[in-house]
Image (cartoon, grey):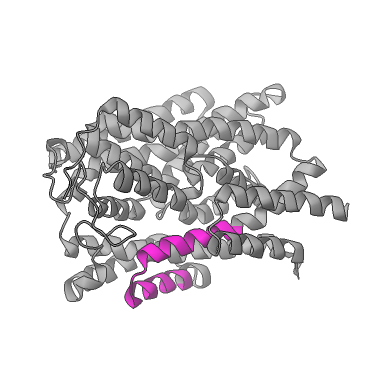
Amino acid sequence: MSAPPAFVPFRTALRYWLKLGFISFGGPAGQIAMMHAELVERRRWISERRFLHALNYCMVLPGPEATQLAIYIGWLLHRVPGGIAAGVLFVLPSLLVLIALSWIYMAWGQLPAVAGIMAGIKPAVVAIVLAAAWRIGSRTLRNGVLVGVALAAFIGIDLLGVPFPLIVLGAAAVGLVGGRLRPALFDIGGAHAAAKDGTPHPPAVIDDTTPTPAHARFSWRRLATVGLAGCAIGFAAWCALALAYGPDGELPRMGAFFGKTALLTFGGAYAVLPYVVQHAVEQYHWLDAGQMIDGLALGETTPGPLIMIVAFVGFVGGWSHALFGPGARLLAGAAAATVVTFFTFLPSFVFILAGGPLVESTRGDVRLTAPLTAISAAVVGVIASLAVFFGAHVFVAHGAPRWDAIAIGSAAAVALLRYRTGTIKTILACALAGLLLSYWHG
């Protein structure tokens, strides 16, 4: 067995997290796979088992699991500064790119060429969501019990309208009981899981047997201190907005809604979006359903976490409501996007920096990790339900099937699942198909 790599310098980690922020395309599934390939297999900064242990915790948390995983690994390597740097650098490039794309969309999105491109991208989005469910499911659903949990979650949220928090609690209960009765069904795998060629992975900087670092050891005092500090930062930011624009202003309202969204929704971006659609579209009227799907398409074409679609929601809401007057729509959109991003991601930092030591203390005890495994399985069903929701808007118009959208979506699904075509290539091909069809019909 080869020796583990030397300890990772903070500067080296900063370069990697900044690079990841610019190249992390493909939504949470692609970003997690990218981090696994780079940090587990190539750089060997963290072992397979500890990577999966962190991932299961991040998947059960409210908010974007890929971002939280980056924060977790950054924190494990370099304490609180490492976690903050990893999270900020993972998000910042996406925010800047998405503000620019949202401006282009709102300023020129009604042009026939742009509308045709978006009509081609929307079916691709449905296929991308389905592919994400398949890929995450192939990693998570390792036996019939976990498949059953995913199926029950899909039926509960899509057909019965069960709130997602109740689905999470139900899955956790299944894992809690199953972890005691049949622990092997909920185990995340043995130490040094095999590589693709069947050989064991070499040791890592943070290996299966590496002692828990001092900063990652659990204490109630540390948990309370970090948790209260995060709450204080969020409350102070909201109060500043309320003082500037009034508590009923759109910016304070966005901050309050997306802060609550980050706390009350689970399962990452795909699970969050139905909740965002319900409120941002139907209650607050910051945008309509068509713009929401367009926003997801833009989110899929930009680097960073897919939950950055909320920045698009904020931008469109700020632009449409002309928060700073008709002549400053771009400034209003950028300000709203920044506010939404801050309140959406702040809880993720708090969850990881406060709860990480508790998670590290559960490592190796399948009775405690089994609920996380079961909840990860339930998330697969929720993601599938999101594909159904988008499909109903994209593939059907006025009660009749849209055969051109169905054809594009089917081709995208085959490309993603059968030929493993990259997300960006698939979106570009579908955009071209939509553009050509718009000229054909026009």
Q: Which residues are magenta?
A: 126-155
Locate residue 426, reporting x and y percent: 62, 52
Q: Nearer the viewer, residue 178 or 24?
A: 24
The residue under the point 54% across, 30% down is 96
Toward which corner of the image does residue 143 lie, by quadrant? bottom left
| Relative to 345, residue 280 above or below | below
Task: Residue at 70%, 49% (x, y): give it.
Answer: 431
Determine the residue positioned at 17% across, 54% down: 363
Where does residue 34 sit, x and y in percent of width and height?
41, 47
Instruction: From the top left corner, tell me how far across and down residue 298 is, in percent.
Output: 61, 43
Q: Main secondary structure of the magenta part?
A: helix
Would residue 342 be visible to someone looking at this image?
no
Q: Quadrant of residue 141?
A: bottom left
Residue beneath the point at 32% across and 39% down: 71
Residue 148 in the magenta stretch? The answer is yes
- Residue 228 visible: yes
Residue nearest the viewer, comparing 263 with 400 = 400
